[in-house]
Structure formats: C-alpha cells, structure tokens
Amino acid sequence: MPTRALFLLFMVIGCSPLFAQTIRGEVLDMDEKFPVEGVSIVNIYTSLDISTNMQGAFLIAAASGQLLEFKKQGYKTTRVRIPHGYVPSYFRIIMKRGLPEINNNAYANHSNRYDYKSDSIRFRELYKHELDFPKMSAIDMIAHPFSAMSSKNREIWQFQEEFDDFEKERYVDMTFNKEIIGKVTGLSGDSLNNYMRRYRPTYQQLRTMNDYTFFSYIKNTVHYYRKPNTPRGAQ
C-alpha cells in the first residue's frame, strides 16, 4: 500500500492490555502540516524513549492504557494514551508551536486548564474522513453484504464507536498533566508518575470541577499521597 494511503487510512486493531504492541505513526506541525523530525517520544510507564525520523515517522512499543509523551523544543508537549480494546494502527500526532504556559499562581490562571472544546473540534477535523464514514443499517447490510463484511469498513465503524472514549481519556491526560501537577505539588520523576496513576480522576469528575475544585483536588490528594496514614479530613 502506498505510504500516502497509510496517512489517510485509519485502521483499528485489537490490543491486549497485558502485552505491548508496536505503535506506528507520524508527527505533524499543526500550522504547516509538515513532518516534525527529532521529536522525543517517551512511554512514561516503561521509560522507553525514541525519536521521530526525518519524515516525522515513529515506531514505539506500548500496551493499552499506557501514556506516550511527545516533546520537542519549540513545541507544546502532546500526550496520547493508548486506548483499551481497539486502537488505531496508525497515529497522526499534531504538535503546536510554543511552550507550556504555567503560571506560578495556578489557582488564578484559568488558561492553565486544557481547552477541551477547541482541541476537540480540531481533533475531529483531523479524523473527519473516518468519523463521517457512513454507517450501514440492518437493511443496508442485507442489501450490500460484501460491504457489511468488508474488514476495512468494520474497522472504521469500530473506530467510530471507540472515538468518544478515546477523546475522554485524552481530555483527562491533557488536563491532569505533568506540567500542572509538578508545579502545584513539587513532585517529579517516579514520585510524580506514581501519584498521577494513583489519583488520576475520571472524565466525569474533571468535567464537574471548576479551577478552584480542580486545584483543591490536587492539593488534597497529594497530601494523602505523602502521608497515606493521615485520616481523611485531617490536614
């Protein structure tokens, strides 16, 4: 299959939560859409670290639920969590130029929170071809059995079903991120990773939090993380 076709075709394959698989993809500049060379890609669960080649392409081992972090000087950090169940066989990662904006007074700066609405619109536009791919009714499946049985069609329909869950996981990753958590808690390295795994909030929890309750959640949970024997409610 031509390389260009791989960029446009979004296939979905099964992934065991217990074993890593090879994740393939490319990193593109958000504005110019050119491939970004030399992006550091780290699996934060295994510490595996690789870089994109001259074509912006990459191969990295990751299992379901693991988080990949994409970093390059001059670009904002991007994170992608490998979904449970079905995952894309080819990832397009879009990186935006600039640096993370972390204000010393995290409670006062609303811009520290992830802009879910605009990023969701951009992400859906990126996969517009797959998301707009027409679904078949039961009658259509009977009338067009070969289309209904096509592995390519079934893979795209599976991706459509998984996309909302994929977006929710991405929202949590982008909101509950290392830059903000590290700034507020002072944690780093393995301590930061362990805290984020243990106290990772759900999508539903985050959507009900305003800035104050979000940072209060971090403050309270890191207190229990540092002093696990402290009774709830005691400071």
Image (cartoon, rainbow, N blue to C red):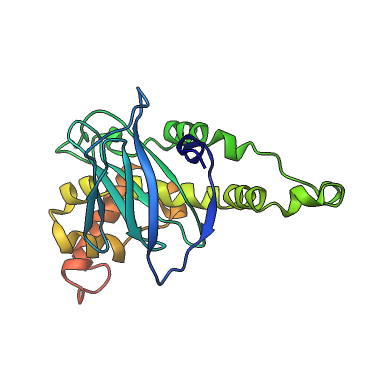
Question: How many marks can you see?
Answer: 0
Is 233 on the left-hand or right-hand side of 88?
A: left
Query: Which percent across, then down, holds residue 86?
Result: 52, 58
Residue 231 against residue 20 in the figure, above or below: below
Q: Farthest residue toward the top?
A: 32
Residue at point 28%, 49% (across, down): 69
Query: Which percent across, then down, holds residue 25?
Result: 39, 45
Q: Farthest residue toward the front?
A: 1
Residue at point 51%, 52% (across, down): 165
Quarter placement of the C terminus: bottom left
Query: Which percent across, then down, holds residue 112?
Result: 27, 37
Query: Which percent across, then down, holds residue 99?
Result: 20, 32
Tell me if residue 209 can be seen: no
Residue at point 80%, 47% (across, down): 137
Residue at point 22%, 67% (across, down): 224
| Residue nearest the viewer, comparing 170 with 151 | 151
Is 151 on the left-hand or right-hand side of 119?
A: right
Residue 217 against residue 175 in the figure, above or below: below
| Residue nearest the viewer, comparing 59 with 120 | 59
Is 142 on the left-hand or right-hand side of 231?
A: right
Tell me if residue 58 can be seen: yes
Residue 107 against residue 141 in the figure, above or below: above
